[in-house]
Amino acid sequence: MTIEQEKVMYTAKTHTTGGRSGVSRSDDGRLDIKLSIPGTSGAGTNPEQLFAAGWSACFEGAMGLVARQMKITLPPETSIDAEVDLCSNDGAYFLQARLNVTLPGLDREVAQAIVDAAHQTCPYSKATRGNIDVTINVVTN
């Protein structure tokens, strides 16, 4: 299903060769990385790490947007530890993920409200909804 778009804000373009043991480069030259298979000693990153980094960065941006709408300032120590598992069941591969969100100093209910709204707003969360198991844990300290 394609959603009619009023405006495309940005298009990421990459060229990848060699799959999980290859290289990936963006058309603007800002990304130029070596890829390696998860769990091997090879140099480079893997798609699961890239997905975890992209999702957590986007999610924190969505939390900032939500917090501004709620007239709340996110703590400077706000962070997200993302975990993306590559799983296999009878030869079928799938992902599952956890986002561990740290919002030190915020009331737990406020932090949970921000995280819940961000999960509805973040494009990565929207893309994964109903497709992979996702757990979001809130840490307020």
Image (cartoon, grey):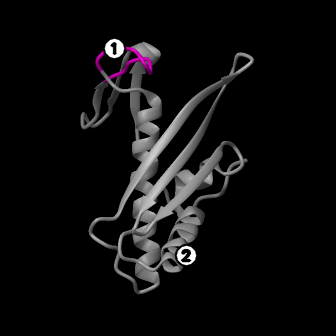
Q: What kind of residue is marked 2?
A: Ala
Residue 10 visible in this rendered orientation of the protein:
no
- The residue lying at 39 percent from left, 44 percent from top is 53
- Upstream in sequence: badge 2 or badge 1: 1
| Residue 45 coordinates in the image, percent (x, y) | 35, 26
Residue 133 to residue 93: above or below:
below
Q: At 41% across and 26% down in the image, what residue appears?
A: 46
Density class for disc 1 (Cα within 10 Å; few <14, some 14-19, many ≥20) is few
Vertical position of residue 6 compared to residue 67: above or below: above
Image: magenta residue range: 34-43
| Magenta-colored stretch includes residue 89 | no
Q: Residue at x 62, y 27 (%)?
A: 87
Query: What is the chief secondary structure element of the magenta stretch?
Result: loop
Q: How many marks?
A: 2
Picture residue at 32% right of the left edge, 33% below the top = 27
- Give the left or right position of residue 122, taking residue 140 as reference: right
Hey, what amino acid is under mark 1? Ser
Q: CA distance from mark 2 to mark 1?
A: 41 Å
Q: Quadrant of the C terminus?
A: bottom left
Instruction: State the mark number for residue 41.
Output: 1
User: In which image quadrant can residue 112 be found?
Assistant: bottom right
Residue 75, given in percent of the width and then of the height, sits at 31, 73
Task: Please tell me whether residue 82 is drawn above or below residue 110 in the rendered image.
Answer: above
Q: Quadrant of residue 21?
A: top left
